[in-house]
Amino acid sequence: MTTQTSQKNYFNLHTTGIGYLNDIREVTPKTKKDGKYLSCRIAALTGDSEKPEYRYFDCNVNGEEAKKLIKRCEQAVNDDKKVLISFVLADLWTDMFKYSRDSDFHKKGDVGVSLKARLIRIKMIKIDGELKYQETKSAEQASGASAE
């Protein structure tokens, strides 16, 4: 007798980039069933390198390696050091919200949009220009094979 297992297939949407790490925090959801999770904000660089623009992503950090690396950066971020990371985001989505106070560009009650994603991989970390971490390629990555 043989048993047949069904393998699930997924479509992955991954975004890679480089940007500054900010606002590392542990979040307790309103519904306590899921428990706490690690979150951060990335100011991703885009456009001309002489005059870059920023795209801000609010990220849930997923995977033990990514969590460990983000936690290693927490003190530097809290000390207002420039923490530049090369990253991989997955499953981007948007979240609408209302501004709760006046700002330079928006008034209380205006609707805003936040870009959200799962931070799944860190490829490089620099703190104040000094390289602190560089991902090493595994044999699987070097051969071009992917488990994703």
Image (cartoon, helix red, strand yellow):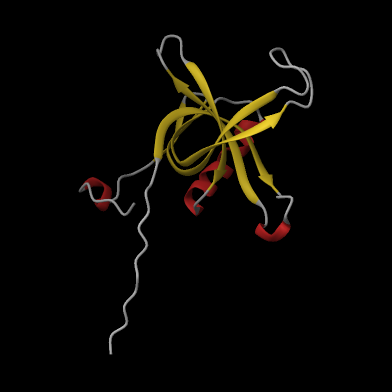
Image x and y of residue 62, in percent: 52, 49
- Residue visible at 72% across and 57% down in the picture: 32
Image x and y of residue 111, in percent: 68, 25
Q: Look at the picture and state if 50 lies above or below 55.
A: above
Of 23 and 126, the residue lying toward us? 23
Image x and y of residue 113, in percent: 61, 28
Of 1 and 35, the residue lying toward us? 1
Q: Does residue 2 appear to the left or right of 93 in the view shown?
A: left
Of 140 and 6, the residue lying toward us? 6
Image x and y of residue 137, in percent: 30, 45
> Which residue reaches farthest left?
143
- Residue visible at 31% across and 78% down in the picture: 4
- Residue visible at 50% across and 54% down in the picture: 64
> Which residue reaches farthest bottom?
1
> Which residue reaches farthest top?
50
Image-quadrant location for residue 124? top left
Q: Look at the picture and state if 20 lies above or below 29.
A: above
Q: Does residue 147 appear to the left or right of 108 in the view shown?
A: left
- Residue visible at 59% across and 26% down in the picture: 81
The mark tally for this picture is 0
Q: Does residue 105 appear to the left or right of 100 in the view shown?
A: left
Image-quadrant location for residue 103? top right
In the picture, the quarter occupied by the N terminus is: bottom left
